[in-house]
Amino acid sequence: MAAAILKLVDTSAPPSKPRDTYRFEQRRAQRYSVTGRATAVSQADPADGTLQRIRSLQLVNMSDCGIGAVCQDALPLDSTIVVFVPPHGPERGMDYYGRVARCTKKDYGHEIGIHFEPKSAA
């Protein structure tokens, strides 16, 4: 029986080429699953004549750096967006400002990733 060899890096690649490695999780913050709906106001493309558009989002996950959600419409990458999460019980609602980092078409809508804008220390 031959011994199996596990390689995480392709050592046969020439040194001038970047080596092929597995892509591991590289997130800056822990991601938490969430459920609920939120309202988003996004900056639309000025070419179509509308400046802002209101959309409904189904929240999927959230971290300190961003939100993952499902939307029925495609959103342009790097467009600005504000997400309004309504209050729930004794908790207060929150407003999140960010940019669309990812938009992927799926059978049930568009999965979008929103990266929060850095907050100024004042």
Image: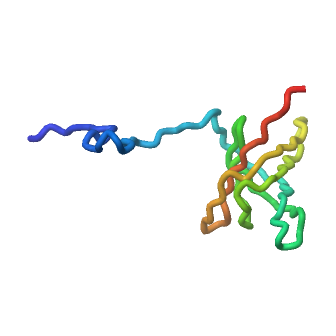
The residue at 66%/39% (across/down) is 32
| Residue found 69% across the figure and 38% down from its top | 63
Residue situated in front as seen by the camera: 23 or 12? 12
| 112 horizontally vs 91: left or right | left
Total of numbered circles in the picture? 0
Q: Residue furthest front?
A: 16
- Quadrant, the N terminus: top left
Image-quadrant location for residue 94:
top right
* Along the viewing direction, whichever of 20 and 89 lies nearer the viewer: 20
Q: Is residue 117 left or right of residue 16?
A: right
Could you say where residue 17 lies in the image, as x and y percent from the top left?
A: 36, 45
Residue 21, can we see it? Answer: yes
Residue at point 84%, 47% (across, down): 85
Q: Position of residue 53 (x, y in %)?
A: 87, 64
In this rendering, would 71 be left or right of 31? right
At horizontal 74% and vertical 67% (from top left) the residue drawn is 73
* Nearest the eye: 108 or 55: 55
Q: Quadrant of residue 9?
A: top left
72 displayed left or right of 9: right
